[in-house]
Amino acid sequence: MGALPKRKISKARKGRRRAHNAIKVEGLSKCPKCGNVKRSHFECEYCGNYKTK
């Protein structure tokens, strides 16, 4: 027989353990050329601009 928990894990304890599992929002910025929202440190998906290049 496999390992079994000795006690029920409470909702609060489970929530504290999962506190860091939330999906993080990526850093967003505006493209200086076209003004659309883009991911920071990535080229613009719409115009292909990256650091005015």
Image (cartoon, rainbow, N blue to C red):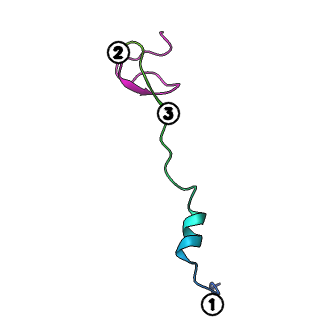
Q: Disc 3 designates what residue?
A: 27
State the residue in front, 48 or 25: 25
- Kind of residue at badge 2: Cys
Residue 41, above or below 9 = above
Q: Residues within 10 Å of mark 2 (few under 14, many from 20)?
A: few
Q: Which residues are magenta?
A: 35-53
> Mark 1 or mark 2, which has the lower sequence index?
1
Residue 19, above or below 29 = below
Q: What secondary structure is marked by label 3?
A: loop
> Mark 2 or mark 3, which has the lower sequence index?
3
User: Split into 4 quadrants, where in the image is the N terminus?
Assistant: bottom right
State the residue in front, 14 or 4: 14
Q: Give the residue drawn at x 59%, y 71%.
A: 13
- Kind of residue at badge 3: Gly
Q: Residues within 10 Å of mark 3 (few under 14, many from 20)?
A: few
Q: Disc 2 designates what residue?
A: 34
- In front of the other: label 1 or label 2? 2
Q: Could you give the CA–CA distance between mark 2 and mark 3, rounded to whole angstroms?
A: 18 Å
8 horizontally vs 30: left or right: right
Q: Disc 1 designates what residue?
A: 1
Q: Give the residue drawn at x 42%, y 27%.
A: 38
